[in-house]
Image: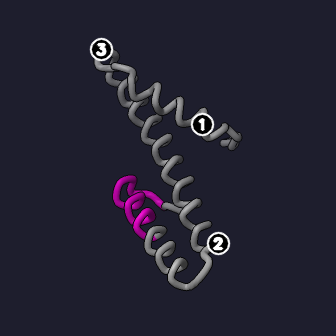
Amino acid sequence: MDKNILIPHRLVLRIIEMFEYWDISRYDRVIQDEYRDILRELYLKMKKLELREAYTGIIRAKDEDARHSARIEYLRQRNFIASQYAGDPD
């Protein structure tokens, strides 16, 4: 059973940054694949958080022009996630 937990945003950023510095080239292929998968999932999580913030921008827009701009940005980010991660961005 998968359970979700709350991890502070800053900590997730620090974990990603630490992972990016690790040189795993000397490790077994299984470890390298696992490393890439974990890092990819962390990147995806951060992109989904950014997408949620972009959606909030639509809701909080002050006028129709701002709402339109926010919607365009939201759709741009959503399409990027879909193309880069081939998954459901929602």
Colouring style: one colour
Along the polypeptide, which appears first: circle 2 or circle 1?
1
Along the polypeptide, which appears first: circle 2 or circle 3?
3
Q: Main secondary structure of the magenta part?
A: helix
Q: Alpha carbon of mark 2 to alpha carbon of mark 3: how far?
A: 49 Å
Question: Tag on residue 39?
Answer: none
Q: Residues within 10 Å of mark 1 (few under 14, many from 20)?
A: few
Which residue is found at the position 57% from the left and 67% from the top? Answer: 55
Q: Secondary structure at mark 3?
A: loop
In the rendered image, residue 53, in percent from the top left (x then y), is placed at 58, 60
Quarter of the image for the C terminus: give it: bottom right
Circle 2 or circle 3, nearest the eye: 2
Question: Tag on residue 26?
Answer: 3
Amino acid type, label 1: Arg
Residue receiving disc 1: 10
Q: Alpha carbon of mark 1 to alpha carbon of mark 3: how far?
A: 29 Å
Which residue is found at the position 39% from the left and 53% from the top? Answer: 85
Residue receiving disc 2: 60
Q: Secondary structure at mark 1?
A: helix
Amino acid type, label 3: Arg
